Image (tube, rainbow, N blue to C red):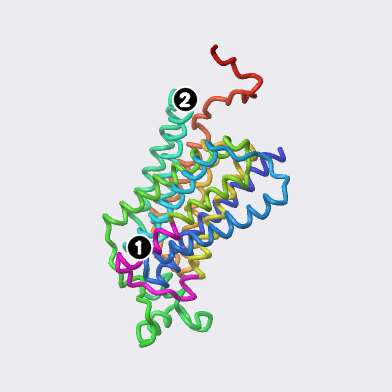
Amino acid sequence: MVQFLRMLAAIALTAFCWGVYGPVLHFGRDGMQSPLRPFVCVGIAYFLIAVLIPLVLLTRGGEKGSWTRTGVLWSLLAGTAGALGALGVILALNFGGKPIYVMPLVFGGAPVINTLLNAFMTKSFNQLKAPFLAGLILVVMGAVTVLIFKPVPHGHATPAAVASAVPSATVDADDAGEELAESPTHSVAPATARPERFLEVLLSVALAMFSWGAYGPVLHKGQTAMAGSRLRPLICIGIAYFLIAVLVPLALLGPLGDTGNWNSSGVLWSLGGGSLGALGALGTILAFSSGGKPFTVMPVVFGCAPVINTFTTLAFAHTPTGAVSPFFLAGLLVVAAGAATVLAFGPRGHAPGKPHSPADAPPAPA
């Protein structure tokens, strides 16, 4: 029972961190007006939290598990999938998408990818029953409903306006938009000035959806190969993020003609987004260490995260309740219900066999 509660706490940590991730990262993107600079900050945060801190803890000893070539490879692949998912989210926001519907779409499709990939990796497609398939359909229908009935933000209540208003605590929402529009020193354009490029947003969402959908099964395989270690897979994830989200974007800033700018507000929000992502990765690893499996852990995370994302976005943007369509809220509920159904009726895979020790290995042929 204690282990089950520990698993639920770890799942809650991941769902909360990844639910708040999109709105926080949106502030960083709007602050620096660049898709690459926030990505760099996300990678730096991952390096600090997922590499340096675990390395210090490992030197103190007491961590179970061991380094293995297979575990390192799979964990690096998991980190690569996570970094590409983060890039997809940033690109979707850069093309005019809003966190209030971008993140539910990602989290609605990711559990489908997660379950199908896990079934493929564990050879358990024969366990895909009718209730489970109905849950997948609910997830897709809910995601489409979220997209169609997405809230239309008001010019004075966008996250960019909230993040950039100085001093935001002393002006109301209606005055904030006028102040930003009239200030000659304001260098960051409001989010409403950036038109939504629908096709590019959908392609970016698809990148994030497939990458984060693959994240859980691949990470679980890496952790299993390292005998259940918690810190070693996290270090590999941080290294992959550093390579993909720091070194590569820094090298591309000049050749791609990035016109953004480094500023304290954008950097801090982006570092905050990266920190949330890294803590979410840690929560996933802890859930697996507590007996959770990708078939169960990831759908619950992806079912709860969009709800947290929606209410966080509405709170940050001071969006009036009347601006949210009841069909949009119904779509969120359908996504959550579909994820819960996938959780309840998803295939469980085959029980892993007892690991073989070197003494149990068959003799080599003469």
Q: Are marks 1 and 2 in contact (CB under 8 Å)?
A: no
Task: Report the magenta residues as a range.
Answer: 245-267
- How far across and how far down the image is residue 270, in percent? 48, 66
188 left or right of 297? Answer: left
Mark positioned earlier in the residue sequence (1 or 2): 2
User: Residue visible at 62% across and 25% down?
Assistant: 355
- Name the outermost residue toward the top: 366
- How far across and how far down the image is residue 303, in percent? 49, 46
Q: Which residue is mark 1?
A: 252
Name the amino acid type tagged 2: Gln
Question: How many marks do you count on the picture?
Answer: 2
Residue nearer the viewer, 87 or 248: 248
Classify residue 286 by image quadrant: top right
Name the amino acid type tagged 1: Leu
* Tag in front: 1 or 2: 1
Q: Which residue is mark 2?
A: 127
Q: Height in image: 175 above or below 13?
A: below
Label 2 crowd bin: few (<14), some (14–19), many (20+), radius 10 Å: some
- How far across and how far down the image is residue 255, in percent? 30, 65
